[in-house]
Amino acid sequence: MTESDGCRIFVVEDEFLVALQIEDDLVASGYVVVGPFTTLEGSIIASREQKFEIATLDLNLRGEFVYPLVDELLERGVPVLLLTGYTAADLPERFRALPRLAKPFDSAELIRQVERLLAAR
Amino acid sequence: MCSAEALPKNLESKIGTLDPPDFRAMLDALPMAVYVTDREGFITYFNQAAADLAGREPELGKDRWCVGWELRRTDGSILPHEECPMAQTLKEGRAIRGHGIVAVRPDGTMVPLLACPTPMFDKSGMMTGAINLLVDISERQRQQAEQDSQFLAAIVESSDDAIVSKDLNGIITSWNKGAERLFGYAADEVIGKSITILIPAGHEDEEPHILDRIRNGVRIDHYETKRQRKDGSLVDISLTVSPVRDVTGRIVGASKIARNITEQKQAERTVQARLREQASLYRLTEKLHRAKGIEEIYDAALDAIRAALNCSRASILLFDQSDTMRFVAWSGLSEHYRHAVDGHSPWTPDARDPDPIFVEDMTAAELSDDLRATIASEGIAALGFIPLIAGGRLIGKFMAYYDKPHVFSETEVSLALTIARQLGFSIQRIRAERARQLAEEQLRRNEASERARAAELQAIMEAVPTPIWITRTPDCRVIDGNRSAYELLHLPPASNLSFSAPADERPSGFQIFSAGRMLSAHELPVQRAARGEEVENFEQEIRFEDGRTRHLLGNATPLRNALGEAAGAVAAFIDITERKQTEEALRESERRLKMALDAGRMGAWEWNLQSGRVIWSPGLEVLHHLEPGTFGGTIAEFKRDIHPADLAAVEQAIERALATREDYHVTYRMRLLDGTTRWMEAFGRFSPPDSAAGERLAGICMDITERKEAEAQRDLLVAELSHRVKNTLATVNSIARQSFSMNPDARDAHRSFDARIRALAQAHTRLAEAKWSGVSLQSIFSDELAPYRNEGMDNISLDGPPTTLPPKHALTLGMAAHELATNAAKHGALSVKTGRVSVDWVVDSNENRLCIRWSETGGPPVSPPSRNGFGRLLLERVLASDLGGDVRLEFASQGLNCTIDVPYLRGAE
């Protein structure tokens, strides 16, 4: 798992118990978790200050959508994995092609998606 | 000799002075015949001389008027007694003097005498009878005759006329020089022979007849006959035969005077021919005048031609329509001949005043062999062509045919021309008459067809289901209607429909209104039309007294006389009551539609594909934020309002509809000039292709912005639901992992997991009950603590202001309450009977924070837990993270205290 060693992953998830699981899974695979962040404002600020390679984002943060953050990250060339209960049809057109993992997710699948994003980087 | 006239007129009075016996003796002795009668004519006296004269003895009181046996006139004819001079005197009361008669005695001898009857009167002047004096003149006559006969003999001998006498047996007794000249016989050749030597064959029975008459004393005057001369030739004579009597009047023979009348006869024949010709012309004129038909004219003309021109056959030919001369009438011509010469004419129709042509001898005429043969075989030896002129034009000819060569006299030529003139005139007259009859017939037919048409129109008028009013006078005092009109107005047929009528004749039961106003008589359409106005599309309403109304629409037009003046009017109306009601219903329907469109934020539109014109309802203009009536009516103007992003889709929908003629349906956004965006949905359908107005696409537009927004909201909610459900499942997933990974006791871990899931479900239930609007803080804790509540011990208290938690708070606090309650039940205050849990909370509205404090007392001694279990993780990290709050756990000796301080915006729920 040398590839993942020290690799930083920006996590945005407002549901603490879910965030806890993401964090557990990533940490267990040797990644460093930045976050998790639970609000849009907080996550945007953090994303500009912190260093990370990829981001896993929940879409709905207590009623606020993270689209501005997604746009910003995509602009910066940061690979984004959407972790959400929304279906593709619920998403704005421009985000439908993004890698997406439906909740509730399988830990192994999460790690595979993260690895794929990193490999494609 | 004593003349009767010499007797005194007052004989009676003179006689009356004589002594009567002397008077009687004197009369008896008188050598002259005297007799007396009473006033009735019966003989009362006669003398001997009278009896001698009469040759008989008269019977007194029986013989009447006359003593004689028989009387004759001097010419030998019988004189009835009642006509004798005596009878006349008695009848007329006057004297007659010297009237010569002949008395025939019973022995047959005759006595010529003069009668001199004189009436007799009594003193009062009453006629009592008459006296007659008869004078025998036989002797005087005999002497006279002797003188006369010598004189007459000289006359006879010198007369040019043949004078012959014969006896009663027809034997010639005398023969004068005239007879010698006329008959060629000398006197001595014929005297003593029978007169019959002069009678030619065929006249044999004349002589016995003549002799019979002579014997009876009847004279024959100017009997025209023929006699044969000695040389055998016949001579026309006029014969007068008289009886010859002896002195006593006895017929002893006859004298004949014969006059040569040959020349006279010739002249007579000529005159008669002229007369016949004139008569034929006269008859022709009369027949032509009376002729009813052309055939009668032809017949009369043919008769006249034959009679006047002395021909045996005749024909009439006229030009037909192709100007060919055709036989129209003929007599005595064979069909073969007519056929052979048909069309031959010496003249063309344009010949001016042609002269008649007379061919006196066909053998000398210049003719083709064929024609000559034809004419010869018909036995025609001479011909006359006489032109017929009518109205200055040659119309034909008539022909006279002769069996023998014929010299046409001037008279014949003149007659032919006269007949031709009359015939021509008559044909013209008949033709004109025929033309007039045809014209009259045409007129009658026209009149008949006019009448038929009028009757037809009348029938139609009665039959049409539309009311009609008619007036035939400009003042409209009487207006008639057809059946429909009377039915409409509920009036008896033939009643007067005029409001211009005298008051007692006017119709009643209704009034007429127009535009809501009652019309006076002169404003009514029929009355207006009768004044010369064309009243068109006049709408009137008939209001009946019973409240019913009928609406009528129609026209009234003047009826004009030959001078063009309005002489009446006619009006026809249709009952539009139902239509009015329908229109009203339609208006109502349109109003409702408009209301519906308005209420539904809809507008109607129509696109005429032919003209390209687009019509919008006012409602659609409103939807487009246009002032009513300001839409420009073009597709371009419609497209201008379409959101650029949706324009292509709309255009595509229109294209598809036009291509397929299927219904048009599209949803699009409008971006209006004022910057607002609205969602629209349009439906359209094509009008039937045979529509006269051109093909149209018509439909409605609906503002569906609210619906779109609702749909978006719904989509959002669905997404939100999906998000929450999946988040919840993810949470459950996480809880499971935490429950099972942290607790080495699988059974305990399982129970804990179940309880946590139930708590989560309980919080969801509360949220669902409140439609996710929020859950009261008290119910969250109350639910979790309820299983441990001991009413008698009052072991649980909840205290705080009513506080509604948003869903997120409710779920997270629900789970926190669950962990606190299960921990208290397992290890804390609620694990013993004396233990007590109190939950109280305050809301700091200044700081917008909610502070909840959980305190346990009376439980077993508390020590901090050896490991960080899920409950603590949840309380310390989940609450802090999810709610952004502070959670402080204080493991005091008397029991656990937990303080939860979270941001709380009271209005946020």
Image: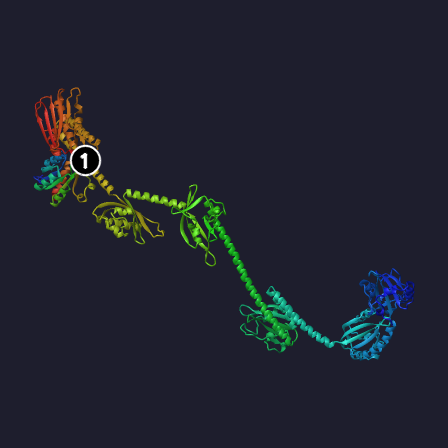
Answer above or below: position of B699 versus B269: above
Q: Position of residue B778 (x, y in %)?
A: 17, 28
Question: Label 1: few (<14), some or many (≥20) within 10 Å?
Answer: some
Of the pair B44 and B593, the residue shown nearer to us: B44
Residue B408 visible, this orientation: no
Q: Position of residue B363 (x, y in %)?
A: 63, 77
Picture residue at 16% right of the left edge, 23% below the top = B788
Q: Position of residue B436 (x, y in %)?
A: 55, 63
Q: Position of residue A41 (x, y in %)?
A: 12, 39
Of the pair B788 and B459, the residue shown nearer to us: B459
Which residue is labeled 1 in the image?
B724
Q: Amino acid at mark 1?
A: Arg
Picture residue at 69% right of the left edge, 75% below the top = B270
Q: Chain of mark 1?
A: B
Residue B724 visible, this orientation: yes
Of the pair B774 and B742, the residue shown nearer to us: B774
Picture residue at 31% right of the left edge, 54% below the top = B611
For residue B43, side relative to residue B334 (left or right): right
Answer above or below: position of B863 versus B846: above
Of the pair B288 and B337, the residue shown nearer to us: B288
- Determine the image quadrant of residue B286: bottom right
- Determine the image quadrant of residue B589: top left
For residue B195, side relative to residue B774 (left or right): right
Secondary element type, mark 1? helix
Q: Quadrant of the C terminus of chain B?
A: top left
- Determine the image quadrant of residue B822: top left
- In this rendering, the count of numbered labels is 1
